[in-house]
Image (cartoon, rainbow, N blue to C red):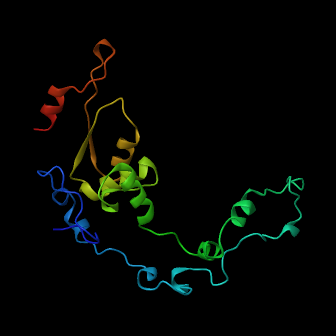
Amino acid sequence: MPILGLKTPGPSHPPHFSLEEIIRPNILALQPYRCARDDYSAGILLDANENALGPSLPSLSSSSGSTSDGASGESTAGTDTLAQMSSEEKYLLNRYPSPTHDSLKNQIAKFRGVPDENWVFLGVGSDEVIDMLYRVLCVPGRDQVMTTPPTYGMYKVTANVNDVGVVEIPLTTEGGKFQLDEEAVSFSTH
């Protein structure tokens, strides 16, 4: 089953690997969320919680009471940034940002030398990405993940939150090296 919502087919490398085969079927069957901005590009969309009065910004006039050196004690950093924005950019501040972040993902794709934004995934820090992987790939109460302590503690915490079992195979530390215990890993996967 293809991943719904992609504008073009996603990555297919390495050729022997299919991402669709490891995603939970109920996740693959989800219809992508469509917001009102997908269908309308102009106007204020009250059902999308857009502020019909425009952005709530401090006055950009010099009569705000602060001097050029900020002697009034008020921060001027925000107004300095706002003063550099165009009217169109200020107008858009009353809207939610793009949920897909395509322009940022396109820039990252160009920087990393990958075909397009479909090859780039963004998350709000590694904890969110780990949680999302468990939710998309693991069936709660049935699947297990393997960790190799000492490791990042959120792997286990997030597995527990998502009702995913954890098999811990400690790294071997002989001679100061941190190596996979290949025999233990192989045994635990059978």
At a point 65% along the width and 71% down the height, the residue shown is 86
Q: Residue furthest top?
A: 175
- Above or below 147: residue 170: above
Rendered location of residue 66, percent (x, y):
87, 60
In the drawing, does residue 103 fall left or right of residue 188?
right
**Which quadrant of the rendered structure holds the N terminus?**
bottom left
Determine the residue positioned at 23% across, 46% down. 144
In the rendered image, residue 47, in percent from the top left (x then y), is placed at 51, 85
Can you say which quadrant of the picture contains the C terminus?
top left
For this view, does 69 lie left or right of residue 44?
Answer: right
Reply above or below: 85 against 70: below
In front of the other: 143 or 11: 11
- Please say whether residue 165 is visible from this viewpoint: yes
Whole-percent x, y for residue 174 in the image: 28, 14
Residue located at (26% from left, 24% from top):
179
Does residue 60 appear left or right of residue 179 in this picture? right
Q: How many marks?
A: 0
Work out whether residue 161 can be spotted: no
x and y percent of residue 39 in the render?
41, 85
